[in-house]
Amino acid sequence: MTNHSSGPGSQILVDGRPASAPLRDTLTVAQKLVRHFADNVTPCGSLPGEQLQSDVMDFTIVCLGLGIQMLDEGISPTDEDLAEVRNSSARWAREGFPLKLVLRILHEGIQEAGDLVASNARKEDLPELLVIQKVMFTLLECVTVAATTGYVEELEAVNSERDGAAVNLVTALLSGRKAATAARHAGVELADEYVVLGLSIPSHPTEAVTHRRKAVVARQKLRRLQIELADAAGGAALCSLSPDGGTLLLPGSPERAWMVSLLDRIGAAAGVPLTATATRVRTAGIPAAADQVHELLGLAHQLALEPGLYEMDDLALEYQLTRPGPGRTHLARLLEPLQGSPELIETLEVHIGHDLNRQRTAKQMHLHTNTVDYRLKRVAQLTGCDPTRPSGLRQIQAALVARRLEVEQPDR
């Protein structure tokens, strides 16, 4: 047995033979390793696709060649040597082969190759085995970095292409342009109808932390939301979003309960409660529908509504009252007798917000229920509209909305 160093030009010997000897019939060894991958690494006991199996074979031969070079010459591979590793990994990324399986193939293959190299070792070869172990770890590090770099760079390019095509499609749909070509480029089949959602995304609490960059935190919030949206909607949702909100297009006619669940799910991922407005239209009606849902969304903010999903059925009265005129002015004036008693207006708003539940109103306002009753009676006396009776309540509700809109948009 010949002693050696692990530096350039030195050759590692095991049992008096070059340590690389068991690997030199690279085709036979590669075939054995690929069979091992198929039986033990990849799902369903087979590598997907004949072309991909051929790629794995070529990839394995390249890695074996790198291992032989390191064992014989003690030289780590250069970027040029690793080019085929990066290229193969990039092809797999484009074909949708999971990165975790690429890395498992690498790790399993190098482990198996190391076992072959050490298979004929004797007790006296222990120093050489330690060097071989170091070589294999170095090889694993080099090919893992190269494969991961190639995979991630290609995946980013693929996602950029897909995102760009999706943005073009959403832009075409929202602007009313013919979207067939954009849909073809995006790989999307247009639906006959869509639910159009206007989405409001509030700031995450961490966006206000001074030592963190607000724009970075906001993008992270949006990215978490987008990932969860893609998963929850099966990739079918089309969107034009910024960290503050935007527009979602959901194909078909999903039920309201599903959309509420979707909002809860993506809101949880973003870490903020979401407000959305929605309407259902044929594809050609998307531009007008988008204008309407965003008008409704603005109205929801003006009225300080709780986060959640709102449709026209929920806001029809309020929406109509956004149109100024004598009717809205008349309704707003119904509450003029309460101007000097802001506690009465507050009691009305809290009581209506709690679905006319006296106990909950009293609890929130830290009052006795008798005080709530007294204030509601005073409202009836001063306005002539009794909020405890259905007819009076309808007028009071409309008057509260009209009053707020008259203050916030008097010239509209």
Image: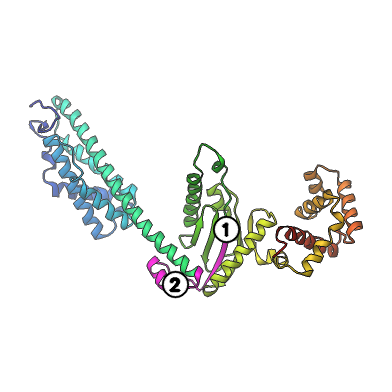
Q: Mark 1 packing: few (<14 Cα in 10 Å), some, or many (20+)?
A: many
Does 146 sit above or below residue 402? above
Residue 190 within the magenta-colored segment of the rendering: yes
Say whether residue 324 is visible: yes
Kind of residue at badge 2 = Ala
Mark 2 Cα-neighbour bin, 10 Å: few <14, some 14–19, many ≥20: some
Residue 111 coordinates in the image, percent (x, y) = 24, 39
Asked if residue 127 is positioned above or below residue 97 in the image, the reply reads above
Residue 127 found in image quarter:
top left
**Residue matched to label 1:** 199
User: Where is residue 178 shown, x and y percent of the image?
Assistant: 45, 74
Q: Nearer the viewer, residue 70 or 83?
A: 83
Q: Circle 2 — which element?
A: loop
Residue at point 7%, 26% (across, down): 2
Query: Who is closer to the viewer here, 155 or 340?
Result: 340
Q: Could you say which quadrant of the image residue 131 lies in?
A: top left
Quadrant, the C terminus: bottom right
Q: How is the image coloured?
A: rainbow
Of marks 1 and 2, which one's residue comes earlier in the chain?
2
Q: Secondary structure at mark 1?
A: strand
Confirm or deny contact between disc 1 and disc 2 (CB under 8 A).
Answer: no
Residue 33 against residue 194 in the figure, above or below: above
Q: How many marks?
A: 2
Instruction: Magenta stretch: give its range.
Output: 174-197
- Say which quarter of the image contains residue 138: top left
Q: Position of residue 241 (x, y in %)?
A: 50, 57
Asked if the stretch drawn in magenta spans residue 180, the answer is: yes
The residue located at (79%, 65%) in the rendering is: 329
Query: In the shown orientation, is residue 354 left or right of residue 230?
Result: right
Q: CA distance from mark 1 to mark 2?
A: 22 Å
Residue with the mark numbered 2: 179
